[in-house]
């Protein structure tokens, strides 16, 4: 119904209305939702972007997250908020850590940080993006460090990803 028709029927759109019954067509469902963590670390060679294993699915409403990859179907297309956090222990000042979100193998978001003192420290890098995803698009998560040796990312709450449909 056009706004002019509503106003001509003496409905004031600035008024508050109490609805009884069902309202349809308002809002979004906002699924799928995925939240996954790394149970244990993925070994990452020095200066090499490595796909991180997220093997603890806490939420996966539509069963779209498998083998640390989120894949969109024809019924789950839309704009998504994707948040990625990766963590490594670094023990030397000036060493860096990067996190990457990849869509179909191409980086769409990245962030970089690093160690700011000597001695063992937990470093966390977080990045996020809002992107449109269509059928068969997939999202994967990568980490990279330049510590000089092969080391595993931190698991549990320190390395995690969230994927949420914002609008279809």
Image (spheres, helix red, strand yellow):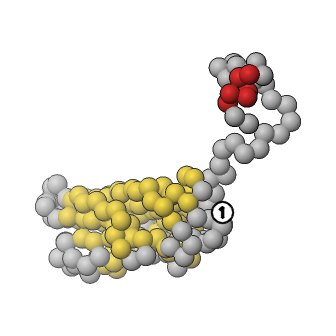
Front residue (pair 26, 116): 26
**Residue 62 place in picture, x, y as percent:** 66, 66
Total marks in image: 1
The answer to whether residue 40 is seen in the rendering is no
As drawn, is 163 to the left or to the right of 47? Answer: right
Residue closest to the far right: 21
> Could you tell whether 27 is left or right of 144 in the image?
right
Residue in view at x 15 percent, y 55 percent: 117
Q: How crowded is mark 1: few (under 14 residues within 10 Å), some or many (20 or more)?
A: few
- Residue 148 falls left or right of residue 73: left
Residue at 25% across, 65% down: 97
Q: Which residue is drawn at 62% across and 65% down?
A: 76
Q: Give how far across and how far down residue 23 sits, in percent.
A: 78, 39
Residue 4 found in image quarter: top right
Pick the residue in front: 11 or 15: 11
Q: Image quarter for residue 150?
A: bottom left
Q: Nearer the viewer, residue 4 or 141?
A: 4
Disc 1 secondary structure class: loop
Residue 69: percent from left, percent from top: 50, 75
Q: Which residue is disc 1 drawn over?
A: 61
> Residue, x 36% and y 65% (percent of image)?
108
């Amino acid at each position: 119904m056009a706004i002019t028709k509503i106003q001509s029927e003496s409905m004031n759109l600035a008024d508050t209305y109490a609805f009884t019954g069902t309202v349809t067509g308002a809002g979004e469902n906002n699924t799928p939702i995925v939240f996954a963590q790394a149970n244990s670390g993925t070994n990452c060679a020095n200066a090499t972007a490595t796909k991180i294993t997220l093997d603890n699915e806490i939420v996966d409403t539509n069963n779209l997250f498998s083998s640390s990859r989120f894949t969109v179907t024809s019924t789950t297309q839309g704009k998504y908020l994707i948040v990625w956090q990766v963590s490594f222990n670094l023990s030397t000042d000036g060493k860096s850590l990067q996190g990457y979100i990849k869509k179909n193998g191409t980086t769409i978001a990245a962030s970089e940080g690093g160690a700011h003192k000597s001695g063992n420290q937990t470093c966390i890098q977080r990045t996020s993006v809002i992107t449109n995803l269509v059928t068969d698009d997939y999202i994967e998560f990568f980490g990279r460090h330049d510590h000089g040796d092969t080391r595993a990312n931190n698991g549990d709450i320190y390395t995690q990803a969230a994927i949420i449909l914002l609008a279809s």
